[in-house]
Image: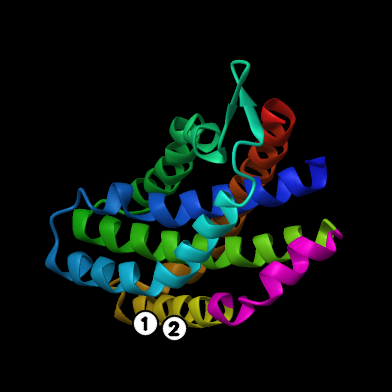
């Protein structure tokens, strides 16, 4: 497998982990409003998640871990602590901005939706930058799924902003939010690159 193909499959893997990890911290919160939101997210993420898993299966046992041929899954799994750390960074940002617990929870959900939307754009740019025809064609065939998810996330973000009890503060925190998203994007790209180097 070429390094370019490896980057593509790890990009799929790390994006899948973002969809999977989205629920990790939010599931621990006992809140009826969030529980309803997360049930809807689960349905909306399904098609993109399934496609990413299908892509991840394609290389088979093409990766190396401790001198053994393995699938991409244990390679991605070895980054679990780091990936969860990205969501903890979002949680920390929410805690710093708001004292009220309910407001913290809602802001964390708002941040996670925004970051996932941001990362769908990053993934799109990343795949196209690889200049790999097979990968781009495979992704292009399901671009409608990504567009639908992006549109839903955008609507969800707008809805959250309208419902937010301290809506006026969201604009004040916009610059900080963008900086955080950029930092997490760099970590995501770095992980894709380092995993490609480590396991191929």
Q: Is residue 191 left or right of residue 7?
A: left
Against 199, residue 18 (above or below) is below
Q: Is residue 86 above or below residue 163?
A: above
* Camera-side residue of 175 and 3: 3
The answer to whether one can see residue 92 in this image is yes
Give residue 42's mark.
none
Is 22 contained in the magenta span? Answer: no
Q: Main secondary structure of the magenta part?
A: helix
Q: From the viewer's perspective, tell me whether residue 34 is left or right of residue 193.
A: left
- Position of 25 relative to 129 (above/below): above
Quarter of the image with the N terminus is top right
Could you tell me which residue is drawn at 58 percent across and 46 percent down?
184
Residue nearest the viewer, comparing 102 with 42:
42
Residue 88 x, y percent position in the rendering: 40, 41
Would residue 173 be visible to someone looking at this image? Answer: no
Magenta residues, start to end: 131-146
Residue at the spot of label 1:
159
Badge 2: few (under 14), some or many (20 or more) residues near its Cα, within 10 Å?
Answer: few
């Amino acid at each position: 497998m070429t390094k370019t193909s490896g980057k593509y499959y790890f990009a799929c893997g790390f994006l899948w982990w973002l969809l999977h990890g989205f629920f990790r911290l939010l599931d621990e919160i006992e809140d009826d409003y969030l529980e309803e939101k997360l049930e809807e997210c689960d349905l909306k993420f399904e098609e993109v998640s399934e496609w990413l898993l299908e892509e991840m299966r394609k290389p088979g046992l093409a990766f190396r871990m401790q001198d053994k041929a393995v699938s991409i899954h244990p390679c991605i799994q070895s980054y679990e602590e780091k990936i969860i750390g990205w969501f903890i960074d979002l949680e920390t940002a929410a805690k710093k901005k708001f004292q009220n617990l309910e407001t913290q929870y809602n802001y964390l959900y708002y941040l996670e939706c925004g970051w996932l939307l941001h990362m769908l754009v990053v993934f799109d740019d990343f795949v196209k930058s690889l200049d790999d025809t097979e990968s781009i064609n495979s992704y292009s065939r399901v671009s409608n799924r990504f567009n639908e998810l992006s549109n839903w996330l955008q609507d969800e973000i707008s809805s959250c902003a309208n419902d937010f009890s301290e809506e006026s503060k969201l604009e004040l925190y916009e610059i900080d939010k963008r900086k955080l998203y950029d930092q997490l994007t760099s970590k995501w790209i770095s992980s894709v690159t380092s995993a490609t180097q480590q396991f191929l």
